[in-house]
Image (cartoon, grey):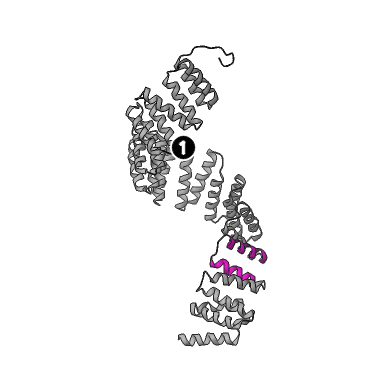
Amino acid sequence: MLKTNSVYFFDSVEFEDIIQHYLDNGKHSLAKKAVKLGLEQHPTSVMLMLFNVDLLIIADKFNDALALIQELALIEPTNDVIFLQKGIIFSKKGAHFKAIESFNKALEFSPEPEEVWSLLGMEYLYLDDFENARFNFEKCLEVDFDDYSALYNLIYCFDMDNDAEGAIKYLNSYIDQNPYCEVAWHQLGRQYFTLKKYKKALTSFDYSVLIDEFFIGGYLEKAKTLEKLERYQEAIENYLYTIELDDPTAFSYIRIGECYSQLNEPVTAIKYYKKAVHEDPLLDKGWILLTNAYYNEKDYQKALFYIGKAIQIDENNALYWRKYADINLQLDFFEEAVRAFHRCIHLNDVAIEIYIGLADVLVFLGDFNDALSVLVKAKKTYRQFAEIEYRLCGLFYVLDNKEFSFIHFKNGLAIDVEYHTVLKELFPTVFEDANIQKIIANFKKATE
């Protein structure tokens, strides 16, 4: 008809089949043409008008769709599809209470209430009303045990209420009636895992993979649980099995590497970390694990290379810059360490060890004024810290302000007398000063 401009008569049911076929295949423009032709031949067909509503919703023309639905409701006030469509429109407009009202109306007339319960459950989820959402998903499962979408949503409600015990109770009752459901056993294991009941979790995951030997999610969760039980070799076997069942993932390779690390096999751990970054080069966690592995092996050059990779991916991660500073210190690259510490502070990582680390490197480089500025800034946040006071003592002394130096030394003694030996490590000449020794002697005498 479209190609020849000829007009043929089709029954309305045939138009419905044609339109449904186009909608199922995502050919909306052809579906729209079929609706137009269908309504020209059957202008009073409610079903064809409902298909028109579908197309208006797909085009985000919610007001036009709603206006058409209101007309249809006057024609067929007991048609459940009309109220379903009306609810869907309200939902897409964000009017969830009105959507619930429409779905409840549809429930009065629907021959398949489970579809309506599912929609009601989703509306309550949008409203964070997990109790009512759970109630509707439970109704779905009473009709169809194999409605896994409803089961997942139901357990999600328990998760959002932090009610693992409630989820376990429900899942056990579900399993009593449907014992060969691998999804239910998997979800039960997840709840036990949340409660740190790892042996029960492992049993549940075992059942899930016994029921379905190709259930990748079951093997993954089983492997994670075996890690918690420190059964690392078995965990590795399960992670490897997931790779056999499906395409390898960076996550699995990283977990295998972590297991080998726990087994004190760093060379094999590194091998799997490298597989992880090969699989996903933008996964910064893989690069940082390689960094730590080489750092622990004291191969600081390689550690520096890999921390550089991690920073390229996430240059605003202060923890990476901390590690970068540490590695550069190990390699005696002090200027780079200074840059890294400054970057940490710029990223609001203002822990006292950052300030102290930066000040100590600047002292080593002879940049006493810069070191002093850093510590003065640190003191605004960390007012009573011996680590700062003793360093200020040394810096003011070398900058020829002995009055301030002695004041800060006394402050340090008042906070932590034992820590005063840090002055000997960082500023041995200052420590040997007669006045400093006299202050120490007087302080000890006063506190005896």
Helix, strand or loop at label 1? It is loop
User: Residue at horizontal 46%, vertical 20%?
Assistant: 16
Q: Is residue 287 above or below residue 53?
A: below
In-front residue for pair 211/134: 134
In the image, the segment drawn in magenta is 334-363
Give the left or right position of residue 117, taking residue 416 as reference: left
User: Residue at horizontal 38%, vertical 26%?
Assistant: 73
Local crowd size for mark 1, using a 10 Å CA cut-off: few (<14), some (14–19), many (≥20): some
Give the left or right position of residue 85, taking residue 255 as reference: left
31 inside magenta stretch: no
348 inside magenta stretch: yes
Q: In the image, residue 90 lies at what x, y percent? A: 42, 35
- Circle 1: residue type: Glu
Q: Which residue is tagged 1?
A: 213
Q: Which secondary structure class fits the magenta region best?
A: helix
Quarter holding residue 324 = bottom right
Q: In the image, residue 80 lies at what x, y percent? A: 37, 27
